[in-house]
Amino acid sequence: MESRIIDAFRTSVLFVCLLTLISCATGSSIVTGTVRPAINPDDVKLYLEPPMEYETIGIVEASSDVEISSQAATDRAIKELKKQAAKIGANGVLITNTESKSGDVVGFYSGGVFYGDASETKTAKGRAIYVIRE
């Protein structure tokens, strides 16, 4: 009985640790144009079609691991994409690609039983742009 309680506690602690490690987004940017002063990421607009007149500042990419909700991971990746664009002064991101990637199986053994699942990552890529006219 006591070993079951200890195993359950270990499982719970490990799950919380794994969830904490994977619930963030990462991103990067490559400057290809003229950098502008950084702006608030909330002011960056997303575009699926190019606006009337714009300048390309760079390429941005972001990813987030799926831990509970696929939509939440996508939302975090888009938020990170806007953050990366804002750092280089872009007021828009022209989305070029979004995808899901399956990764390795992540898990652990406890009491002779393997608890695990395949990891999944949501990614978003785009061109960081400075919109002159919509």
Image (cartoon, helix red, strand yellow):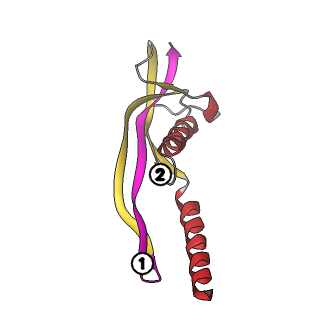
Does the rendering let one see residue 39? no
- From the image, tell me which residue sits under label 1: 113
Residue 14 at x, y percent in the picture:
56, 72
114 sits left or right of 86 in the view: left
| Residue 60 location, quadrant | top left
104 or 128, nearer to the observer: 104
Is 23 colored magenta in this rendering? no
What label does residue 66 carry, if any?
A: 2
Residue 28 at x, y percent in the picture:
47, 46
43 or 24, nearer to the observer: 24
Residue 2 to residue 101: above or below: below
Residue at 59% x, 61% y: name it.
20
| Residue 8 location, quadrant | bottom right
Residue at 56% x, 80% y: name it.
7
Residue at 53% x, 41% y: name it.
84
Residue 44 at x, y percent in the picture:
57, 29
Residue 46 to residue 81: above or below: above
* Residue extent of the magenta highlight: 109-134
Residue 105 at x, y percent in the picture:
36, 65
What label does residue 44 carry, if any?
A: none
- Other residues around mark 2 within 10 Å, as few (<14) / some (14–19) / many (≥20): many
134 or 89, nearer to the observer: 134
